[in-house]
Image (tube, helix red, strand yellow):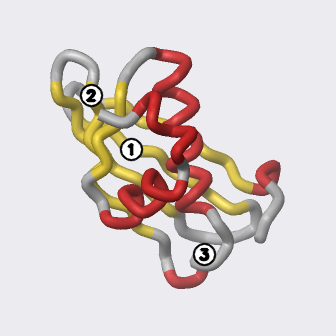
Amino acid sequence: MPAKSQVEVTRELGATRGRYVGKLAGHAGEAELTFFRQPPDIYVADHTLTPTALRGRGIATMLVEHMVADARREGFRIRPLCPFVVTLFNHHADWSDVRA
């Protein structure tokens, strides 16, 4: 598993949709977690995708962790729709404060 410092995570925001993007230093491709917004304060995490070459490194989990951290800092809540995100939320009772 790469060190968190080797993975660059960014967030892209559109008017109604957005995504978290993870890039591993020295590797082509990117992992993503997409979401759409439900007013007034819910982000619906609807899809994760990690290219085959990047799988098994925990990058998708890092994307969800960033989303959770942003939700706590910015006051939005997360509705997990993607099965991967649902599974993570079910294993992290400590994330219940941001679960919609």
- Residue at disc 3, secondary structure: helix
Q: Is residue 55 left or right of residue 41?
A: right
Q: Earlier in the sequence, mark 2 or mark 3?
A: 2
Q: Quadrant of the N terminus?
A: bottom right
Q: Earlier in the sequence, mark 1 or mark 3?
A: 1
Along the viewing direction, whichever of 73 and 89 lies nearer the viewer: 89
Residue at the (51%, 39%) spot, across then down: 95
- Which one is closest to the eye, mark 2 or mark 3? 2
Q: Which residue is mark 3?
A: 54
Amino acid type, label 2:
Ile
Q: Is residue 31 above or below residue 100?
A: below
- Residue at disc 1, secondary structure: strand
Report x, y in % for residue 74.
47, 16
Q: Residues within 10 Å of mark 3 (few under 14, many from 20)?
A: some
Gap between marks 2 and 3 measured at Cα: 29 Å
Q: Residues within 10 Å of mark 2 (few under 14, many from 20)?
A: some
